[in-house]
Image (cartoon, rainbow, N blue to C red):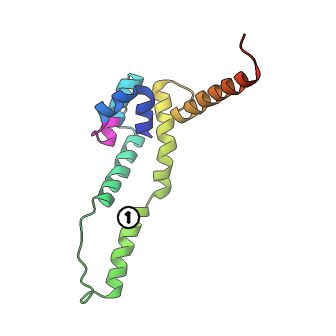
């Protein structure tokens, strides 16, 4: 969502300035550039986003662990797999809820009513309406 948010507000400048920033650095800098405010880093949402991306990084950049199938029991293998699955899916509902919480927070910081996706939908409907109307109402 932050990439869409950045492109919407900053256009091509977003890629040049933000391409290699971490998610938290993007969030803080986008708030400064778009909302002209500092993101509250003591906020629970900020901490939850950090935890989510720490988990994401540990899953994506997982360190390999060897399991010797000749000396390990099936129970040890199952335990290893179950621990990893539990880690990956723990707090999944909370993680899913971060998306809406982030959209709401950015709207609050900007002082706007609609998030980027809602705004784009409104703009698209307006343009569609104009295009349809131009087919039926002759230009004068």
**Residue in the image at 56% along x and 30% along y:** 119
Image quarter hosting the C terminus: top right
Q: With respect to residue 138, does 19 lie above or below?
A: below
Image quarter hosting the N terminus: top left
The quarter holding residue 21 reads top left
Q: Is residue 41 visible?
A: no
Residue, disc 1:
87
Q: Point out residue 49 in the picture as x, y percentages from the top left corner.
A: 38, 46
The quarter holding residue 42 reads top left
**40 or 115: nearer the viewer:** 115
The quarter holding residue 29 reads top left
Q: With respect to residue 136, does 100 lie above or below?
A: below
Residue 39 on the magenta segment: no
**Residue in the image at 59% along x and 33% along y:** 121
Residue 24 on the magenta segment: yes
Q: Secondary structure at mark 1?
A: helix
Q: Point out residue 28 in the picture as x, y percentages from the top left corner.
A: 34, 33
Q: Is residue 140 visible?
A: yes
Q: Point out residue 52 in the picture as x, y percentages from the top left corner.
A: 38, 51
Look at the image and give the residue range highlighted in magenta: 19-26
Horizontally, residue 131 falls left or right of residue 50, namely right
Horizontally, residue 128 falls left or right of residue 7, namely right
Q: Point out residue 53 in the picture as x, y percentages from the top left corner.
A: 35, 50
């Amino acid at each position: 969502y932050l990439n869409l948010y950045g492109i919407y507000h900053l256009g091509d400048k977003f890629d040049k300035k933000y391409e290699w920033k971490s998610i938290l650095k993007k969030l803080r800098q986008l708030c400064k550039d778009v909302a002209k405010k500092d993101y509250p880093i003591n906020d629970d949402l900020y901490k939850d986003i950090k935890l989510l991306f720490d988990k994401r990084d540990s899953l994506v950049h997982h360190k390999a662990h060897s399991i010797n199938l000749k000396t390990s029991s099936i129970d040890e293998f199952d335990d290893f797999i179950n621990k990893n699955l539990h880690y990956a899916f723990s707090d999944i509902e909370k993680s899913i809820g971060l998306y809406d919480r982030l959209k709401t927070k950015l709207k609050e910081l900007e002082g706007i009513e609609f998030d980027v996706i809602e705004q784009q939908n409104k703009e698209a409907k307006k343009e569609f309406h104009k295009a349809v109307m131009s087919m039926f109402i002759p230009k004068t």
